[in-house]
Amino acid sequence: MDGVEINASTEGRHAQVLSDDALELVAKLHRELDPTRRELLGRRVDRQAELDAGGTLDFLPSTQQVREGDWTVAPPPPALEDRRTEITGPTSAKMVINALNSGAAGFMADFEDANSPTWENMVGGQANLIDAVRGTLEHRADDGKAYRLDEETATLLVRPRGWHLVERHLTVDGEPVSGGLFDFALYLFHNARELLDRGSGPFYYLPKLESHLEARLWNDGFSLAEDHLGLDRGTARATVLIETLPAAFEMDEILYELRDHSAGLNAGRWDYIFSAIKRFRERPDFVTPDRSKVTMTVP
């Protein structure tokens, strides 16, 4: 494909995942959105420099009308109405089967923190999810034990990589593509219609966001991909993890930007603590206690 290069294996199941039509969507998203992604990453650096120089974080005066406005996000699809128990893990076949059979309401298949981003894990994981969506995923262990999916399984959600990570094995016009867009687009392309036919949908968790502008970029990506594939607006749904200190000051705005694609917010405890440490690294008055004392009830 013009301008698209893969610097890794494309044999076997990889060829199915990395079809020309799927890569066309990845390339489209890259060309449309990557300049903004890089600009927003630059803003992260600028904000950190301000904090290192003694600045602080606060709610944005420019978005006060959003925080005080009268608006709502889209109602949840039926498959996301019960989220009382959700579990997570990597996209290996055995893990996906056991998680979907666990009895939990939802399983977040993780291309991010629970995953080592090798090419096999990223592309092989997509192949596993293609089979999982269709109920055909199987695994046979070294001892001969067979693993198969039950008739009824947990709702599947997918966490792509954050905006700061790239997929170096795939370049478009000589530049590595966003890892998050790579993960999001391949899953949507291969599974959206199958999921809809089964009464579910392409559901995502979005990690490491630091501003409503980063949420807007995700929303733009969802809309572009839906239009490209002929899907209704709001087909893709996303739960945003609030796991950075800057995002905590823009939660209303993040929901507003994703309102047609929103599936709510979720608190990410450990990364939030890390973000506080990182953001105020030059502030002795922000040293945290032992992590065993930083429980879910601590502000």
Image: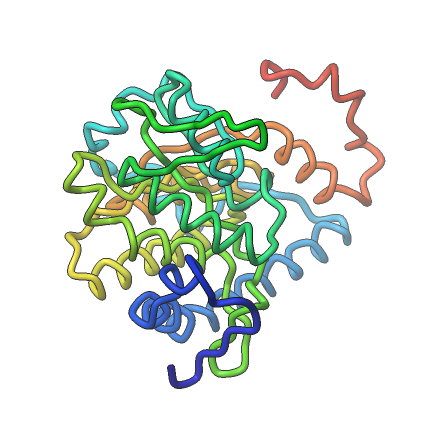
224 or 48, which lies in front? 224
Looking at the image, the residue that sits furthest to the right is 284
Q: Position of residue 265 (x, y in %)?
A: 41, 33
Report the residue at 69% width, 54% height from top: 48
The image's colour scheme reads rainbow
Examine the rendered structure and indicate whether residue 295 appears above or below residue 193: above
Q: Position of residue 183 (x, y in %)?
A: 44, 54
Examine the rendered structure and indicate whether residue 81 appears above or below residue 135: above
Residue 71 in view here: no
Residue 4 in view here: yes
Q: Is residue 270 left or right of residue 33?
A: right
Q: Position of residue 262 (x, y in %)?
A: 31, 40
Q: Is residue 241 left or right of residue 20?
A: right
163 or 179, which lies in front? 179
Looking at the image, the residue that sits furthest to the front is 144
Report the residue at 40% width, 48% height from top: 63
Hey, which quadrant is residue 182 in on the image?
bottom left
Examine the rendered structure and indicate whether residue 250 appears above or below residue 36: above
| Quarter that holds the C terminus | top right
Report the residue at 50% width, 31% height from top: 95
Hey, which quadrant is residue 1 in on the image?
bottom left
Report the residue at 38% width, 42% height from top: 204
Numbered label tally: 0
Q: Position of residue 140 (x, y in %)?
A: 48, 33
